[in-house]
Every structure is written in structure tokens, then in C-alpha cells.
Image (cartoon, grey):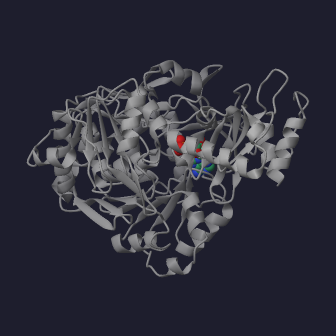
């Protein structure tokens, strides 16, 4: 057996011994009594009885040996600034933020919502929360007031931390008006709002509720705020993600299991060591940002780089200039970003020395072969696809090069990672498909390994009902992705089984977009599907029925309503969710019992064969779609 195969088998067959060994990678205040309590499946409690703290493991424990090493470098090509913090400086800033949060009444177990651009204060905020045992809930800065309001409503934060503005491609996006609107929309009202003023957009501070970070920070310059030792099972954060229904789910993560899982992934998957430099180009609003901009690299004692800006501004060489300047050893990005760079002049890449790089990891969406090939040739380092989800917190499928160097196969994110009992199962029966090359749903046999979601925030029933299926003798977790596996254990991901679409690596629920569009006064009904796109992987396309179609007489009037619908989505959900096109039809394709034929609609929109249509109510419905997309 190969070294990795052996390692993997151990993780499954001797689960507790395996994870007990991994748990030594972090500091514990009290060592755990029990490795895994799975007495109430599918709820898994990892490292029961242990107490620890994420911030201690990410910051304080490195002070003895690397106080003067850069811990965090925040680079913004939007504001043309670079700010670097050593571990000692990060420690001081996090304590100031923690003291400010305490002065605003934040206590252990409280939620703090973070709605911020990619600035160092966002990292301080996350670390400060976990330092005092509060749960952060980071909302992507690209989301607008409707998305923000539903998250405020669900998380019930005591405090919100935000900034005056973010910036993208030189365009300043003021956050405060969106935040004020979201708080007005939400029935839950946070007691305090802490604003970081970057001097980019005017802000109105509401007396009594809103506070200025700079002013409060000045009152706590020399403060010490000790880490709150929390139970391993104490939630560290919630992070919202889209599913089949319109309401986003709050993925709840623990503390001890997450710290161990990340520490283990830094060693076994990324083959990283303290002092190495990690550059993940994601955003803190996504799970990659949580695990591999903030916690993973810091737990490993690395220098982590946070980046605000586009990959192409001031030019397409900017990321490679960062790699050269900071001697980046580990880089993590998404296929869409690489496709964007591929369209630019390759000379930009040749300008910089990228020899410090050990590998480039890509995740979030399928990695197509031409993209992988191009970047592999350009960088001359291994390109490592990795597949996982907000729910799991760290890769399900990839290559554990720290255990044993393995060769990547184009089109495959690789093998089942240690700890994950990955199965391919029949969608209807849940039965395991064991022969190679059979298409099934990618599933994980319970318990999920450390670091994965504990539950859906405040909704255990939703966790059980959404993800888990009982097959004789065991419970399995569904990823909602189709996959196949070859004879050597390499997996291939074939797309989602549900109504989730993936636009440029951003996971969006089509139902959420439909609900937003339906709120437009002249939209009677709408269906949103994802269609293949050469650059973004997929884009959302909407087919809408107007309440009053009498005005839709020509292209100009249709374009006007299309523009209004797009604006509606921008304002409610944010531009990330904006459909690329809104087509107006008189009827949507439905079955005789009134069920929307989403798959058929998507197939026709992608100019594929829609398959069996015998249950369709009105064949003319798809004909309209065919004509519209064919234009
Ligand atoms: P998120 O929770 O936003 O990280 O999205 C997770 C989903 O993105 C997965 O369920 C997949 O559908 C997709 N995904 C993530 N990584 C990959 C990958 N390497 N290859 C194919 N699909 C991926």
C-alpha cells in the first residue's frame, strides 16, 4: 500500500487514534477527554472535554518564537497601500479590538456580524471575536442590504463591525448606507455598530448605536485581553451559504475540531511550515477566506497575505509581483481568476520571478483542462485542484502532498482526504456504488471529520433533514454534487444535484435570485437557471413572465425592464447574484401538475437536448426559450 493509502485507511479504521495524534498539532488549555462523541448521530462532538482558543493558536502561541515575523500583510491595489503586522503587532491589534468589543457589551457566545472589505481590521475583528469566545458571522462585502438583512435576522448579532467603504476596480462602494438599510429591514437590531473609517466615503453615525473604531481603539492602546478558554465544541463562527431554498443556511463551526483540522491540513495537504508565506486570493466573506487567509496559515505560524483589488489592476502582473516581493511559497486561488489572467498578455507573468512558489491550489468550481494546462506551463509548479464546501471547512478531495507527493490528474481534484469516508451513492436509494466510473452523488459517511459543520445555526432539524440520509446501518452526508471515481481513486466532480449554481466560484441559490426578481412589481413569475460560461464557469439567466406585458413591445422596452430587474437584484442581493440576461416569456415550461421544468429549461438555454418532455403542459413554452437564446 502507498504511504497515503495507509494514512487514509488509518484515519477511517482507527479514527480516534488518528485524530488524537493530529490534536497534538495545536495548543490545548485542557486536553480532551474523548476524541469523538458520535452517540447522537449525525451530530459529532470532537475533542470533548478539551478547552482551547482559536486566537491563541493563531496568534499568541507564536509569540515566543516568531514575535517579529510578519503575520499578516494587507495589500490593497485599490488604495495603493500595504500594511504589514508582525505576530507581536497582530497580537496587540487583536487585543485592542477585543477590548473595544467588550466595551460594547460583547460577551462569550454572542454573535458579531462582520461586513467589511479586505482590510487588516477585518482580520483583527475575526480574531478578536474568537479570542473572547464570541461567534463571528462574516458577510461578503459584495452582498447588498437584502442579503445582509436576512443574515442579521438569523444570526442575531449584538454588534456589527463594518467600514465606510470597499473598492473594486477603482469604484468605491459605500457600505454604511447598505448596512443602515439592512438593519432597518431586519427585525433584530444590533445594539452596537463599530465603523472603521478609511476616509473613502462620508458616514452618518447614529448616536448611541454607532461608534468609531479609531476613537475607541485609542482608549485601549495598551490593553491586555486574555484568551477565553472555551470548550472544543464551543462554536467559533457561523457562515451563511446558499442551498435549495431561498433562505441561506448558517453553517456553524466548532473551535477545537476546526483548529485541529486546519493545523492538520497545513501539514498534510499544503506541506507548509512556520515562516512560509501563504497568499490566498479569496475574500474573508467565503470559507476559503476563513480557513486559508486567516486561521490555517496563522495556526501554522506562516505569514498570510490579504489582498483587496482585482487580479488585473494596475496590470495582470500584480499577483506575480506580490509573489516575488513577499517570496510567497503557497498560493490559493480560483479557476475563474486564472481564466481572467489567461486572457491577458502572458508577458506579465514572465516579468516576475515566481520561483519561491511550491504549488498553486485552486478550488471553488470545476477546473477545466486548458486553464490548468496554461497556468501549469506559465508557473512551472504543481497545480492542485481541491474540492470542498463551506460546510466542510477544508478539502474533501485533493492531494495530500505532505504525506506523500502525488501526481495531479487534469480534471480531477484528486483523492478522498483522510478523515472523510467519501462514497459515491445512488441518488434514489443511497446505495453505495463501488465499481469505478459509475456516476453517483458524492457522499460522506458520518461522522464528518473535525472542522466540518456542527449543525445549521439554530436549526438542528434543518441540518439533519437537508444533508443526511439514512441507509441501512449508517448515516451519510450529501454534498449535492455528482461525481465519479476512477480505478485509482481519483474523483471527478460533475456538477450540483440541486438548484445551486456556481458563478465565478461564488455559490448562489437560484431560488434566492428568483425571490429577489419576483419582488419587482411587474414580474409575475420567474425561473433562474445557471448556464455554462467560458469565463465564469456558469452565469445565471432569468426567464420572467411580466405581470403587464403590454408595454413590452420592442427591444428597447424589454431592455428597460431587464435593466430594472437587474437593479433590483443588485440592490437586494448584490451584483454577484445579478443574472447575465433576463428574457421575457409569456409562459414558463411546467409539468401538468405545475412543477417548473428547470432541467429542461437549463438544457435548452445551453442549447442541449432537453430530454423527455412528455409531462410538459405547454410545448410552446420551451420553443419561446429556444428562440430567445438562439438570437
Ligand atoms: P462553497 O460552499 O461556496 O465553497 O461551494 C461549494 C461547491 O462548489 C461544491 O459543492 C461544488 O459544487 C463546487 N466546488 C468547489 N470546489 C470545486 C472543485 N474543485 N471542483 C468542482 N466543483 C467544486
| In the displayed structure image, the side of residue 163 where residue 559 appears, left or right | right
- In percent of width and height, residue 202 lies at 30, 51
Examine the rendered structure and indicate whether residue 371 appears above or below residue 249.
Answer: below
| In the displayed structure image, the side of residue 457 where residue 68 appears, left or right | left
Name the residue nearer the viewer: 108 or 464: 108
Name the residue nearer the viewer: 425 or 534: 534
* Image point (46%, 69%), residue name: 313
| In the displayed structure image, the side of residue 336 where residue 288 appears, left or right | left
Does residue 5 appear anywhere in the picture? no
Name the residue nearer the viewer: 80 or 51: 80
Q: Quadrant of the C terminus?
A: bottom right
Q: How many marks?
A: 0
Name the residue nearer the viewer: 131 or 547: 547
Examine the rendered structure and indicate whether residue 303 appears above or below residue 517.
Answer: below
Does residue 230 appear anywhere in the picture? yes
- In percent of width and height, residue 369 lies at 67, 62
* Image point (43%, 63%), residue name: 170
Q: Residue 612 sits in which quadrant? A: top right
* Image point (50%, 63%), residue name: 360
Q: Residue 620 sits in which quadrant? A: top right
- In percent of width and height, residue 365 lies at 60, 51
- In percent of width and height, residue 141 lies at 42, 47
Amino acid at each position: 500500500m502507498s504511504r497515503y493509502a495507509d494514512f487514509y485507511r488509518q484515519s477511517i479504521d482507527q479514527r480516534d487514534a488518528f485524530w488524537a495524534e493530529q490534536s497534538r498539532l495545536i495548543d490545548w488549555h485542557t486536553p480532551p477527554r474523548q476524541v469523538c462523541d458520535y452517540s447522537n448521530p449525525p451530530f459529532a462532538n470532537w475533542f470533548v472535554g478539551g478547552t482551547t482558543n482559536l486566537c491563541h493558536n493563531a496568534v499568541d502561541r507564536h509569540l515566543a518564537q516568531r514575535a517579529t515575523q510578519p503575520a499578516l500583510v494587507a495589500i490593497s491595489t485599490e488604495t495603493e497601500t500595504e500594511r504589514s503586522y508582525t505576530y507581536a503587532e497582530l497580537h496587540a491589534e487583536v487585543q485592542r479590538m477585543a477590548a473595544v468589543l467588550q466595551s460594547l457589551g460583547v460577551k462569550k457566545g454572542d454573535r458579531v456580524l462582520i461586513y467589511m472589505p479586505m482590510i487588516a481590521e477585518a482580520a483583527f475583528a475575526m480574531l478578536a471575536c474568537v479570542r473572547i469566545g464570541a461567534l463571528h458571522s462574516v458577510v461578503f462585502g459584495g452582498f447588498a442590504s437584502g442579503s445582509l438583512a436576512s443574515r442579521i435576522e438569523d444570526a442575531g448579532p449584538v454588534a456589527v463591525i463594518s467600514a465606510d467603504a470597499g473598492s473594486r476596480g477603482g469604484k468605491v462602494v459605500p457600505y454604511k448606507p447598505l448596512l443602515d438599510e439592512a438593519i432597518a429591514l431586519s427585525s433584530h437590531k444590533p445594539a452596537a455598530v463599530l465603523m472603521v473609517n478609511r476616509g473613502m466615503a462620508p458616514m452618518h453615525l447614529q448616536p448611541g448605536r454607532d461608534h468609531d473604531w479609531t476613537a475607541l481603539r485609542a482608549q485601549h492602546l495598551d490593553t491586555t485581553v486574555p484568551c477565553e478558554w472555551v470548550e472544543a465544541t464551543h462554536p467559533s463562527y457561523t457562515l451563511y451559504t446558499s442551498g435549495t431554498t431561498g433562505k441561506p443556511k448558517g453553517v456553524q463551526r466548532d473551535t477545537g475540531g476546526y483548529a485541529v483540522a486546519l493545523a492538520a491540513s497545513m501539514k498534510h495537504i499544503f506541506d507548509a511550515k512556520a515562516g512560509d508565506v501563504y497568499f490566498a486570493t479569496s475574500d474573508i466573506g467565503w470559507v476559503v477566506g476563513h480557513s486559508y487567509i486567516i486561521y490555517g496559515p496563522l495556526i501554522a505560524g506562516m505569514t498570510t497575505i490579504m489582498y483587496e483589488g482585482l487580479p488585473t489592476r494596475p496590470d495582470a502582473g500584480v499577483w506575480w509581483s506580490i509573489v516575488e516581493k513577499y517570496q510567497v511559497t503557497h498560493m490559493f486561488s480560483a479557476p475563474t481568476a486564472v481564466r481572467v489572467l489567461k486572457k491577458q498578455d502572458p508577458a506579465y507573468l514572465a516579468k516576475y520571478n515566481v520561483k519561491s512558489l511550491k504549488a498553486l491550489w485552486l478550488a471553488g468550481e470545476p477546473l477545466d483542462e486548458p486553464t490548468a494546462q496554461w497556468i501549469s506551463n506559465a508557473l512551472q509548479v504543481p497545480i492542485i485542484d481541491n474540492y470542498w464546501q463551506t460546510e466542510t471547512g477544508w478539502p474533501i478531495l485533493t492531494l495530500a502532498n505532505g504525506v506523500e507527493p502525488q501526481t495531479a490528474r487534469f480534471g480531477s481534484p484528486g483523492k478522498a482526504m483522510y478523515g472523510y469516508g467519501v462514497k459515491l451513492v445512488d441518488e434514489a436509494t443511497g446505495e453505495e456504488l463501488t465499481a469505478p466510473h459509475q456516476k453517483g452523488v458524492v457522499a460522506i459517511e458520518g461522522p464528518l471529520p473535525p472542522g466540518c459543520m456542527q449543525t445549521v445555526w439554530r436549526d438542528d432539524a434543518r441540518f439533519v433533514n437537508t444533508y443526511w440520509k439514512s441507509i441501512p446501518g449508517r448515516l451519510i452526508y450529501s454534498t449535492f454534487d455528482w461525481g465519479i471515481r476512477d480505478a485509482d481513486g481519483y474523483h471527478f466532480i460533475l456538477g450540483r444535484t440541486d438548484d445551486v449554481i456556481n458563478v465565478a466560484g461564488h455559490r448562489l441559490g437560484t431560488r434566492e435570485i428568483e425571490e429577489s426578481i419576483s419582488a419587482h412589481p411587474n414580474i409575475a413569475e420567474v425561473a433562474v437557471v445557471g448556464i455554462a460560461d467560458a469565463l465564469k464557469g456558469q452565469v445565471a439567466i432569468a426567464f420572467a413572465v411580466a405581470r403587464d406585458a403590454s408595454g413590452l413591445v420592442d427591444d428597447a422596452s424589454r431592455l428597460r425592464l431587464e435593466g430594472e430587474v437587474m437593479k433590483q437584484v443588485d440592490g437586494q442581493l448584490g451584483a454577484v447574484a445579478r443574472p447575465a440576461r433576463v428574457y421575457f416569456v409569456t409562459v414558463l415550461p411546467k409539468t401538468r401538475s405545475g412543477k417548473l421544468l428547470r432541467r429542461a429549461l437549463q438544457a435548452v438555454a445551453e442549447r442541449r437536448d432537453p430530454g423527455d418532455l412528455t409531462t410538459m403542459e405547454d410545448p410552446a413554452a420551451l420553443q419561446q426559450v429556444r428562440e430567445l437564446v438562439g438570437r
